[in-house]
Amino acid sequence: NAPSNGRYFMVKLKYSQPIDKFIRDRITPFADVKLIDDLNNEWSYVENFKEWGTYFLPDKDFEACNDRMYKLQITTHDELISGDELVYESSWEKLPLTTSTPVEKIRFEEDVVKAYYFPAGERKIRDEKVVNVLTSIPANLDRQERYYKWQFSPMWVYEAPLATGDLRPYQKCWVTSSLYLNQYVLQEDVVGASDQVLFSLKTENNNRLYKKFSVLVYQQNVSKDYFYFCNLMQEQTKPNGIFDTPPANLPANFTCLNDPSKKPVGYFGVVNESTRRWYFNIDELSYPVQDNDLRDCLVRYNRPNDPPDYAPECLNCLAYTKGEATLAKPSWWKGN
């Protein structure tokens, strides 16, 4: 029901190898993945053959129930790893007991931060203009601990500066990216009535913001154990994190039923989720931002006395390199 193209529940599987091996990790195809409840109802995941090792639950209407418990069961068929079928199961999980709250209004605040840049290979520091995007955590009247997790799905408009004449139909695209704003934010809360910074956006020389930018914000109310798993994972994947080689000593809730020596890393969580879509136009800022796309196309890819040699994305928005572009305007998109 969110203003988006929708998404399925997903599971991604891969094997990790010791770091001294030639291949550190690889996908895990052809697994059987099932969701099971405490009444022995089963839902089977289907592998996405465009992205091997990724499995989705093809049920648009599935919704976890408050009075049910669930577990995830994974059976692998990988002779290169073990020669046998291995069955992994999560612990039984259920929705958090605390009531879920909807995403509050989203807003931004202008800020200036210190950032590195590298002229002639030398590292220097300069001021960089950003916007911090925030939401509010409502007052926690029952004083029960709540554990929040926020994730983000961005979309923006890109216009090819030189798409004129016969190329005019390829001027404007809507772009998504699973790599931009792919971090998550966590917050443990008892009192509430506070602001939470979700993410920051560089405003200058960021062509994602030149036309129109939007983010679907997912707010999840999660269990304490799932929260701490995500928190440790977040710490371990930071540069110079608390451990040298992630993941290590993570409190996973999976076990291998037929080979207890196997120690899978991962967590199956059942969460309450709400969403809100936020739109941003560059002219909402208190200062002007220069759209440099045309300048970059004319300067960066051409040399004096040479025939014009433009980057494909200058002529066709479908060739844009910072995400997956489409000419089709989403039905739920507000404005142009």
Image (cartoon, rainbow, N blue to C red):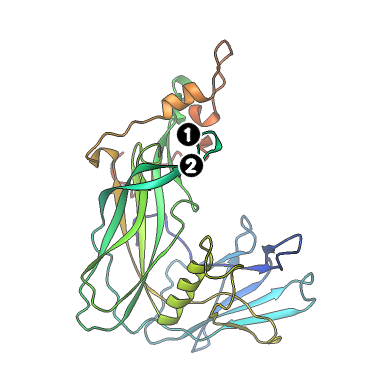
Residue drawn at x 53%, y 85% is 91
Q: Mark 2 points at which residue?
A: 325
Q: At label 2, which amino acid type do we have? A: Ala
Residue 242, horizontal then vertical, whole percent: 52, 70
Disc 2 + disc 1, Cβ < 8 Å:
yes
The x and y percentages for residue 75 are 66, 77
Quadrant in the picture for residue 18: bottom right
Real-space Cα separation, disc 2 to disc 1, in angstroms: 7 Å
Q: Where is residue 291 drawn, in percent x and y?
A: 36, 31
Label 1 crowding class (10 Å Cα cut-off): few <14, some 14-19, many 20+? many
Asked whether, in this view, residue 149 is left or right of residue 300, the answer is: left
Q: Which mark is residue 317?
A: 1
- Position of residue 324 relative to residue 5, above or below, is above
Along the viewing direction, whichever of 257 and 179 lies nearer the viewer? 179
Q: How crowded is mark 2: few (under 14 residues within 10 Å), some or many (20 or more)?
A: many
Residue at (28% x, 65% y) in the render: 103
- Tell whether 149 sits left or right of 278: right
